[in-house]
Amino acid sequence: MGSINNILGIAKLAMMAQQTAIQVTAHNIANVNTKGYSRQEVVFEETTPLNWNPGQIGTGVNAAAILRKYDSFIEGQITDNRESYGNLDIQRYALTNIENLFYDSYGAGIDNLLNDFFSAMQDLSANPSGTPERVALLSKADALADAINNIYSDLFQLQKDMNNQVNQTINDINSITEQIADLNVKISQAETAGHNANDYRDMRGKLMNDLAELVDIQYFEDNTGQVTIIGGGTALLVERGNSWDLGTEINSDNNDYYNIIYNPGGNNSVDLTNNITNGKLKGLITIRDTTLNEIIDDIDRLAASVANEINQVHRGGFGLDGSTDNDFFTPSFKTGDPVSVTGFSTNSGTGDVSVTIIDPTLLTYHNYELTFSANGSDTIYTITNKTTNVSTSGTYTTIPPTSPTFQGLTFNITGTHDPGDKYTVSAHKDAAKNLQVAISTDETYKIAAAMQAVDNGEDNRNILTLVGLQDKLSVDGTSTFNGYYSSVVGEIGANSQYVNNSSMAQKFSLEQLDNMRESVSGVSMDEEMANLMKYQNAYEAAARLITVSDELLQTLLNILG
């Protein structure tokens, strides 16, 4: 009787084990297209045998475990590569948009519009008193100013879009870390109870890859199966079942754009903006704060150079009505005009700084930084050209007032300034935004073609001087207007190509790693169908054992009467 019962027990265990294997196979098949899913397989284990004559007799099989096919090294490489890809891909996207701005109808046309503008001047030089030529010149000038305005506006809008994406990315990061913390608890509970948390680990692994694409992370797993994640170098984002949010804060020193802050205790916020080293967040910050700032500054420099150089010559000539000292463009860049000064929000002094143009011919169209430091009991000011690093410094006094001059600018410093106080100064800031023609179409007589107040309408000497500005190295003393613009566009193109190539290389690397992961963790339909048939046959054979056992039992009962 015992041996027949043993056969029944073996059959029962075999059916249960094969049924488990069929369920796991079905789970694999169902998730064949699930991103991040790791193939699972059943580990079969012999049960404890019975001591029997003539020897030990087996008691069957158990489904001892369901394992997740997983390679931690490959998964770690994927996570690391996702960081770089997230960074490069958003830069590729932004630079493609920037490139498109410079190659569309008005972007690519700036070079042509400069040529048209000077060509219209050349036409006017052939007929200095001609009204049609004067109207045509103003029309070409308007077209040039509009194109520069438009490209500035689009660049600024793209910068705002990048800033909005910073905020959205922070929200995405916080959502992911909250989900990871929740999965930490589920994994720990399952595995503490002796179960492999395969699906929970897959979910968490996918979320960690998604997180890495957004921000640089460091992570480790403890002996309970829970991961601790640090983001941005120092910010504890996840620990066991807890998550801490990143946040944003308006930075008044940077166009009121968002800084990234971390405030786990609710008291002192830590600014992480400069600590972010990779991921989409790093790419957004790079495009917003570096790439676009530099390009906008370049376009401002071009606009300021055009306006200042044209105005200087134009103010020295005479219109048909005998008027002089008239600007052709605004901004005017006249002696005494104020320029942009921005104090840092961290300044503790109560003083004031204003800067005016003292000599338009000396303007560099560079940005400057005015800083204050202490030397014993004295307060020292230092003015530095941020492009060339050329600087000047001196002792600040209120009596007599301190008004140093540097590269065409006068710095009027008053009040109390503390060591560490800083100001940024720019004569060309927003020039591309504000560039306009200063002469209206009903005032064409103000165009200063002549070099003297009274002439017979044939004096073209001043307009010829203006025509000559097209070939003058007016920008930084090294480039013509067209040459400078071409160099800006060329640099954008080179940067875009470099980032695009790097992004494609990173994408290829990720695809290779994904293929490696697929070879280890991926579901093969052919293999699963073969397993399904194997387990089905085993199940049917085990079921046949029950029939055989029943027949044996009936035979025995018949014998015993």
Image (spheres, helix red, strand yellow):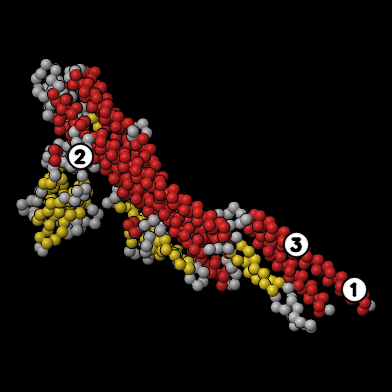
Left or right of 549? Residue 438 is: left
Disc 2 marks which residue? 478
Name the residue located 23 percent from the left edge and 27 percent from the top edge: 118
Name the residue located 19 percent from the left edge and 58 percent from the top edge: 420
Label 2, residues with CA under 10 Å away: few <14, some 14-19, many ≥20: few
Name the residue located 40 percent from the left edge and 52 percent from the top edge: 87
Looking at the picture, tell me which residue is in the foreground, 180 or 199: 199
Looking at the picture, tell me which residue is in the foreground, 294 or 158: 294
Q: Is residue 270 above or below residue 257?
A: below
Q: Tell which circle, 1 or 3, labels the residue nearer the N-terminal end.
A: 3
Q: CA distance from mark 1 to mark 2?
A: 109 Å
Q: CA distance from mark 2 to mark 3?
A: 84 Å
Residue 405 numbered tag: none
Q: Is residue 318 above or below residue 88?
A: above
Label 1, residues with CA under 10 Å away: few <14, some 14-19, many ≥20: few
Report x, y in % for residue 259: 34, 54
Q: CA distance from mark 1 to mark 3?
A: 27 Å
Disc 1 marks which residue? 555
Q: Tell which circle, 1 or 2, labels the residue nearer the N-terminal end.
A: 2
Q: Amino acid at mark 2?
A: Thr
Left or right of 233? Residue 25 is: right
Report x, y in % for residue 194: 59, 72
Left or right of 419? Residue 541 is: right
Can you tell which of label 1 and label 3 is closer to the viewer?
A: 3
Q: Is residue 524 above or below residue 436?
A: below
Looking at the picture, tell me which residue is in the foreground, 233 or 495: 495
| Secondary structure beneath label 2 | loop
Disc 3 marks which residue? 537
